[in-house]
Image (cartoon, rainbow, N blue to C red):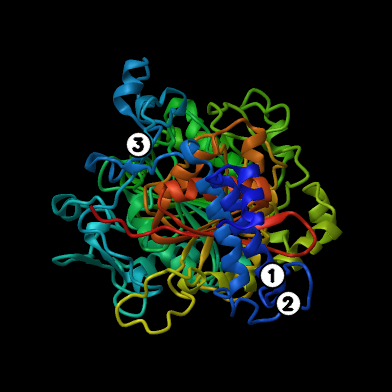
Amino acid sequence: MRSPLLNKLSLIFGPRPPLNWILLCLVSVFVLIALLGSSSTTFDLVTSSAKPDIYANYRKLKEQARNDYLELKSISLGANRIKDVGLCGKERENYVPCYNVSANLFAGFKDGEEFDRHCELSQEYQDCLVRPPKEYKTPLTWPSGRDVIWSGNVKLTKDQFLSSGSMTKRLMLLEENQIAFHSEDGLNVDGVNDYSHLIAEMIGLGSDSEFLQAGVRTVLDIGCGFGSFGARLLSLKLMALCVAAYEPSGSQVQLVLERGLPAVIGSFISKQLPLPSLSYDMVHCAKCGIIWNSKDGLFLIEIDRLLKPGGYFVLTSPTTQQQHSRTTSANKGSSPLEELTKKLCWSLLAQQDETFIWQKTADSQCYTSRQGEIPVCKGNDMQIYYQPLAPCISGTTSQRWVPIHSKSDSLNSTELEINGIQPDDFFEDSDFWKLALRNYWSLLSPLIFSDHPKRPGDDDPLPPYNMVRNVMDMNAHYGGLSAALMKEGKSVWVMNVVPLGMHNTLPLIHDRGFAGVLHNWCEPFPTYPRTYDLLHANRLLSHIASQRCSMFELLLEMDRILRPEGWVILSDTLGPIEKARALAAQIRWEARVIDLQNGSDQRLLVCQKPFVRK
């Protein structure tokens, strides 16, 4: 005989209680357990009382209860749940959106513009995950990965490798499944150390170790080959960013990023690079294949826009040497390139064999005093995002017009105010990221996932201090995460991305000596698949929602550029984080939500991309 209580419940719920009531009861039980459980998992990013071992008890009941609650909530959605995303075909293993030559030609682009970036024409979007090649292997840890990479990780054929003939593309060893680059501790890579030393001597220095003393901290390396010159500069504590055009195969950018060196796809065809004026101390081109005096000098004017006052343009080119020799021997005056550099107020510092070095003027009045020459641009040109190449001089009226020899190693209050930033806000942000970094780094361990399978032979996996090399901060703000990583001596570099529509802090990021670009996160990022180890984004989810962009498409793009077993850390309010967690499950990421427990609705979503083979 049934009890009176059961009879009453039957009257309320019917003979079979609905699934939602059962779920509610289960959730209530978990919540009670959580309230009675330990509070040892508190994660306070903003107080100085945070403990170093704050993440030691992730597998305790309170965290699991929270995760089970979210999983039960997801199950209760029933039919509204999206199916898991499938894998793309093999033809998309090295897929880069916005670079469809056939579509560009059909749309009428020609004279080289068909090879440029055209996201507005991209109709190739598919709800699928870009798979790694069959031969793909997890990259070697840094610094070993700088000198040896798996040949199956890059789209480079043996014939392409053997036909490479420029200064930075020879003397690499192609073995059965590896490409080995000579270390700086051994033989020079085709004399790259000597070449770097030569450049230093040509600008009046004793050696390349004095670049920093001369004000050279940031270098834009155009058409960087296999990145050997950039690797040398990084060893000297300079930030060298490789920029090279998109290539369907044999990509310079893909190979350089695989080595753990900074690189991004960019071309000198019809558009400006997504960088603000006065960004770099030196621009370098060694046989990069660009005819600098073509298109009425638009390419060289773009270099002038990017160079800081007093900065250097280094050009190594046999063609330029031949033109210079012909005009000199025939007493015909200056070559077209030399005439153009004079109009740009550049002075030829030195020339030795195939290498020429010009220096940009530090006097902004030089441009206005030359009537009838290249005009000065009007208006603010700091929010540059793939605008057409401009036939005018930029940055002359900017408060950031400061010669590289006059800049200090660290930013002072005056320089911050020039960038439109309050010093108190900047220093508070710096203190925040110093503390946050320690907590973030502790999250990068499989132990955060209670069901994460241990690798064979790994009894107790440790945080991957040397497994993370290429980091992207997708909403970099002031570059605080990058600065904190540098101060802690982490062996990483950071691509600082300033989203379009946010306060443009990219000039400040470059003034701090960091790499960075502007980007619209409603579009794909200009890089190859599997090129970053860690993606970090603070409040980016809320931003793209305000821009009416798809969070699902953003996460698919993040999956494309993240290497297998790479990490994602998203910080935002509860609503966007819960939505992102549900989507993360669809793209096969392991994910955990962490409550900061600082009285706000701010949450962290920590994910790891699995190594999917098929």
Q: Residue at x 79, y 71 (%)?
A: 47
In the rendered structure, find residue 43 and report the number of the disc placed on it.
1
| Relative height, residue 46 to residue 282 (above, below) | below
Q: Amino acid at mark 3?
A: Ala
Q: Earlier in the sequence, mark 1 or mark 2?
A: 1
Depth check, front residue: 589 or 218: 589
Query: Which picture quadrant has residue 197?
Result: bottom left
Crowdedness near tag 2: few (<14), some (14–19) or many (≥20) residues, C-alpha within 10 Å? some
Within 10 Å of disc 1 (Cα), the crowding (few <14, some 14-19, many 20+) is many
- Which residue carries the number 3 mark? 330
Element on which disc 3 rests: loop
Q: Dot 1 lies on which element?
A: loop
Residue 94 in the image, given as x and y percentages of width and height: 30, 45
Residue 605: image location, x then y, percent: 58, 57
Instruction: Report x, y in % for residue 9.
Output: 64, 49
Give the distance between the C-alpha atoms of the residues marked 3 and 1, in whole angstroms: 74 Å
Residue indicated by mark 2: 50
> Nearer the observer, disc 2 or disc 3?
2
SS type, badge 2: loop
Of the two numbered discs 2 and 3 on the same chain, state the one appearing first in sequence.
Answer: 2
Q: Is residue 432 visible?
A: yes
